[in-house]
Image (spheres, rainbow, N blue to C red):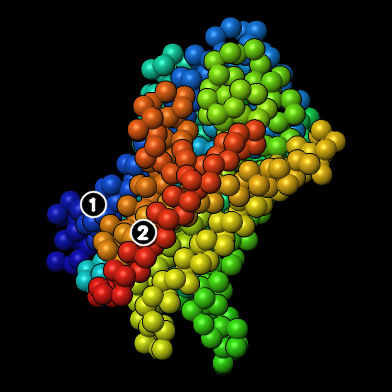
Amino acid sequence: MSAPATAEASGSRTPAGPGMRARWASLTGSRVLARLAARRDRIMLPAWIYVVTILVVSTAYSFKGLYKTPTSREAIATSISHNAATLALGGPLYGDSIGALTVYKVGAGSAVAAGLMSIFLVIRHTRADEEAGRLELIGSTAVGRNAALAVGMLLAAAANCALALLIFAGQAVIGLPAGGSAAIGLAVGACGLVFAAVAAVAAQLSGSARGARGIAISVLVASFLVMSAGAAARTGGLRWLLWLSPIGWVTQVRAYTGDRWPVIALLVAAAVAAAAAAAFLAARRDLGAGLVPPRPGPAEAARSLRSPLALAWRLNRASLAGWVAGALVYGAALGSIASNVGSFLGSSANVKNAITRLGGQPGLTDAYLAAMMGIFGLVAAGYAVSVVLRLRSDERSQRAEPVLATGTRRVSWGASYLAVAAAGSAAVLAAAGLGTGLSYGLRTGDAGTQVPRLLGAALAQLPAVLAVAAVATALFGLLPEACVPGGWTALAVAAVLVLLGPTLQLSHWIQDVSPFTHAPKLPGGTVSAAPLAWLVLIAVLLAAAGLAGLRRRDIG
């Protein structure tokens, strides 16, 4: 009996063509690989989804308590609509309902967070595993070539679907319209899918996980900046820029004010097109290589790179430039609001009381500026922790061994990163203070006084920043396996206590856990040398303990 007859007799379908069989074969083992990926991310992924969901739902809930009357909502919406800087930060505002104000406040921010989650997730399971050699090991088994890419995209899709569902449920539970709640949830989730696909393309272009993350995050930042430029235009002019950015598309869904469902379809279509491009590129490159060849460096290093400090600076200077630029721009935007912060906050006494508690000053303007300096201190601490934790990243990826195989001592290697973290965080704070002082000073006609005043207020946060970075250093030297989660947890605890402690009126002994509680509330407050000296001493002792532990423990 011939093969076709046998197939017909058994009731089976005609076998697929060789092209279709090859495509399915490239996905072999995806189910098992997906279970492994889900297990690896069983802590990180729920944490991302929880934080983004809480960001949206808690903002809406707080707005319901702060702006209870239509008059108060109309006043705050009018203040926002007449300030280009605030529109650039949050995006365009459509309407004065609680839902519309929530979308303005956190719509673009939650889309950025979903994009970051998706970028880290996809690159972790594609280019990072390929760079570490794990995909080569897995590929030697019965696993198809494109299985890792498919699993990364599938896991990102599942995460963003869960995020969209939880945002919808949370917004609906607190009483917001179901249609608008579904619209903002789907818009944020679809935007995350777009950047998951962008990350998949970046993983094919770059030969390293660091380069792929850099490409994808650059696209994300560019999308936000394009959205900001379009939102700041208010009406006419450059307003059309909103349609050139996936984050701008999220704002154009106009959740709670029209609910434009076709825009969500546009986001999904962009994600599908980018994912198809990633699959096309993946089939045309060698395993372990990127489509963009690495640029070879000089045969011999420059004299300026003959020390561990010079190497640490070289490795971190690009990211520092981004942090400094961001701090300068956001400082300028937030400083432009300070001169009329009272009218911007509207008539809500609760909001004004929260600002004065957060800033620790009776005057609303000084309290607002002091609160912003505290937030910039947290931002600088985030930069410092990221630099310190790169020590662990270099150790795990075996990039530290070639450095330590030379005459470089372990303490010198670790101390070089600490020096870059300290100097870089000071630069971030200085940029934030400079931007805030310039914009506020130009608004009030007193830039000569406000620039040094706010520059000093920002730099006063440096001892607290160093204390947080020193915690990460101590963990790296003494408990290396716990340094990454422990370092970020220390920052998160400090942030929660600084931002929510005064508002919730927590006990002083609880708030004192955060080093930022002991930083002076400037401008407007008094400066005491004792708390700053204690913070510096604690930072030095923790850093010394970490370096001593690094000297004695095994590397790797």
Label 2: element kind? helix
Amino acid type of the residue tagged 1 in the rendering: Arg
**Residue at the spot 52% in from the left edge and 61% down from the top edge:** 422
Residue 551 appears in the picture as rendered: yes
In the shown orientation, is residue 45 left or right of residue 74? left
Between disc 1 and disc 2, whose residue precedes? Answer: 1
**Residue linked to disc 1:** 39
Residue 291 in percent (x, y) is at 52, 73
**Residue linked to disc 2:** 542
On screen, 72 above or below 255? above
Of the pair 306 and 44, the residue shown nearer to us:
306
Quadrant (top left, top right, bottom left, bottom right) of the N terminus: bottom left
In the shown orientation, is residue 250 left or right of residue 126? right
Amino acid type of the residue tagged 2 in the rendering: Leu
In the shown orientation, is residue 503 left or right of residue 340? left
**Residue at the spot 68% in from the left edge and 27% down from the top edge:** 365
